[in-house]
Image (spheres, rainbow, N blue to C red):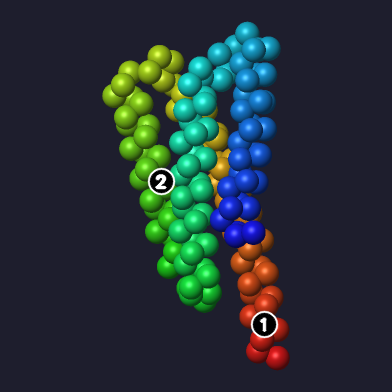
């Protein structure tokens, strides 16, 4: 199975787990910890993470030794896309915008950690294979 498809499936499982946790937090806490539009955040971050991971994976497959030429532009794209998303939400005047932004950045960090962990695991296997080819 293609790496990007496996990544999307694993990320989908993680997203579903996060959605369940956020739903339970929303129902069982009296405090407005979770914004009602958390599904919008999850969908945006899922699509953004799959897109940036596909770009980086494509680059690593074509140019194994030039990982940083693909990872850093993907990271910058992710940051700017997130800023634009937040600006649109602010301009649309979502209610409880502070909770929305707080939830967004917490989830942003979770998705970023997941992507970096997945990329490092994938890169480690590429580097080990490349090291064996030189011997």
Residue 6 x, y percent position in the rendering = 63, 53
Q: Residue drawn 64% across and 74% down?
A: 127
Q: Which residue is mark 2?
A: 79
**Residue farthest toward the bottom in the current orientation of the protein:** 135
Q: Position of residue 46 (x, y in %)?
A: 52, 40
Quadrant where the N terminus is found in the figure: bottom right
Residues at marks 2 and 1, CA–CA distance in whole angstroms: 33 Å
Q: Are marks 2 and 1 in contact (CB under 8 Å)?
A: no
Question: Viewer-proximal residue, 18 or 110?
Answer: 18
Instruction: Please determine whether, in this image, residue 2 is positioned above or below residue 96.
Output: below
Residue 74 seen anywhere in this rendered image of the structure: yes
Provide the secondary structure element on which disc 1 rests: helix
Tell which tag, 2 or 1, sits nearer the viewer: 1
The percent coordinates of residue 24 (x first, y second) are 67, 19
Establish if 55 lies above or below 78: below
**Disc 2, SS:** helix
x 64%, y 12%: residue: 27
Q: Residue 129: x and y, percent?
A: 67, 78
Q: Quadrant of residue 119?
A: bottom right
Indicate left or right for 93 with 25 as reference.
left
Name the residue furthest left.
91
**Visible in this render: residue 102?**
no
Q: Residues within 10 Å of mark 1 (few under 14, many from 20)?
A: few
Point out which mark residue 131 bears: 1
């Amino acid at each position: 199975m293609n790496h990007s498809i496996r990544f999307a499936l694993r990320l989908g499982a993680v997203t579903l787990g996060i959605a369940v946790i956020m739903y339970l937090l929303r129902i069982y806490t009296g405090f407005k910890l979770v914004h009602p539009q958390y599904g919008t955040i999850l969908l945006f971050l899922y699509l953004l993470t799959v897109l940036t991971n596909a770009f980086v994976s494509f680059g690593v497959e074509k140019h194994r030794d030039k990982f940083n030429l693909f990872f850093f532009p993907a990271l910058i794209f992710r940051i700017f896309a997130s800023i634009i998303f937040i600006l649109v939400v602010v301009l649309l005047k979502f209610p409880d915008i502070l909770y929305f932004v707080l939830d967004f950045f917490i989830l942003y960090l979770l998705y970023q950690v997941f992507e970096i962990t997945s990329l490092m695991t994938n890169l480690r296997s590429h580097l080990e294979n490349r090291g064996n080819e030189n011997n």
